[in-house]
Amino acid sequence: MPWYNGDYPPSYKNQPPKLRDKAVEIANEIIKETGDEGLAIATGLKKAREYFKDHQDEADAEE
């Protein structure tokens, strides 16, 4: 099930909003490709963290 409009996996609940939004974006793409929610949730969060690690200026702009 794709996530939209503030609906996101419970494991994303305590993540910063910018990171959570990026993780949801990535997870939704993975669901489209594979249909595997578990993989999408884990990979979405991991890839979002990697993204903001590589794009620190975007993460700092939100604060």
Image (spheres, helix red, strand yellow):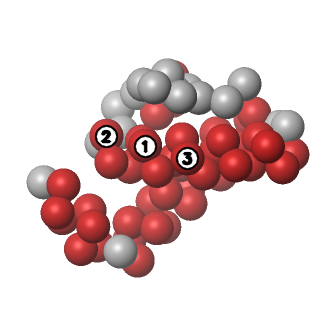
What residue does disc 3 label? Answer: 25
What residue does disc 2 label? Answer: 17
Q: Which residue type carries mark 2? A: Pro
On screen, 37 above or below 28? above
Q: Are marks 2 and 1 in contact (CB under 8 Å)?
A: yes
Residue 41, image x and y in percent? 64, 39
Indicate left or right for 22 with 59 as reference: right
The C terminus lies in which quarter of the figure?
Answer: bottom left
Residue 8, image x and y in percent? 51, 27
Q: How many marks?
A: 3
Which of the 4 image quarters holds residue 3? top right
On screen, 8 above or below 33? above
- Identity of the residue drawn at 42% across and 42% down: 20
Q: 29 or 47, which is in the foreground?
A: 29
User: In the structure shown, which secondary structural element does the residue marked by tag 3 occupy?
Assistant: helix
Q: Are marks 1 and 3 in contact (CB under 8 Å)?
A: yes
Q: Residue furthest front?
A: 5
Q: CA distance from mark 1 to mark 3?
A: 6 Å
- Identity of the residue drawn at 75% across and 33% down: 37
Residue 46, image x and y in percent? 56, 56
